[in-house]
Image (tube, rainbow, N blue to C red):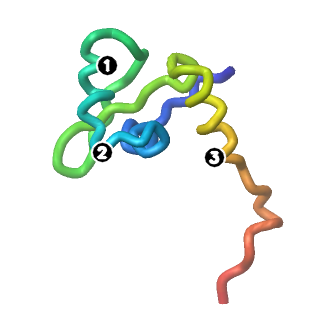
Amino acid sequence: MDDKYININEIAKIKGLKSNRTLRLAINQGKYIAREVLVQGGKSYEILLSSLEPEIQRELTQCTALVPIDDIPKLL
């Protein structure tokens, strides 16, 4: 698997968490491989896909399938 990072807010939704606080604590404890990213108003985190639990990896890869550019409807 390549080095794909996923925003912690997206992971929190998949896990059914009310916020990303649990994920931030897990990052600080070294449970996941993550990187800090600058966002408007501060910083956030992205977690390396391959460091997540296998069932979460499957869920993320199924819900973030790439759509070929030819299949995207054109806007008027």
Q: In this orientation, which residue lies closer to the viewer: 15 or 60? A: 15
Q: In this orientation, which residue lies closer to the viewer: 7 or 57? A: 57
Q: Earlier in the sequence, mark 3 or mark 2?
A: 2
As measured in the structure, the alpha-carbon distance from the residue carrying label 3 to the one carrying label 1 is: 23 Å
As measured in the structure, the alpha-carbon distance from the residue carrying label 2 to the one carrying label 1 is: 17 Å
Q: Amino acid at mark 1?
A: Ile
- Badge number at residue 64: 3
Above/below status of 24 relative to 30: below
- Residue 15: quadrant of the picture: top left
Is the residue under label 2 in contact with that under label 3 (CB below 8 Å)? Answer: no
Q: Earlier in the sequence, mark 2 or mark 1?
A: 2
Q: Is residue 36 left or right of residue 62?
A: left
Residue for point 24% across, 33% down: 21
In this view, the residue farthest toward the right is 70
As measured in the structure, the alpha-carbon distance from the residue carrying label 3 to the one carrying label 2 is: 21 Å
- Residue 59: quadrant of the picture: top right
In this view, the residue farthest toward the left is 41
Q: What residue is shown with label 2?
A: 18
Classify mark 1: residues with Cα within 10 Å, few (<14), some (14-19) or many (20+): some
What percent of the width, then of the height, locates residue 68? 79, 57
What is the secondary structure assignment of the residue under circle 2? loop
What percent of the width, then of the height, locates residue 28? 25, 16
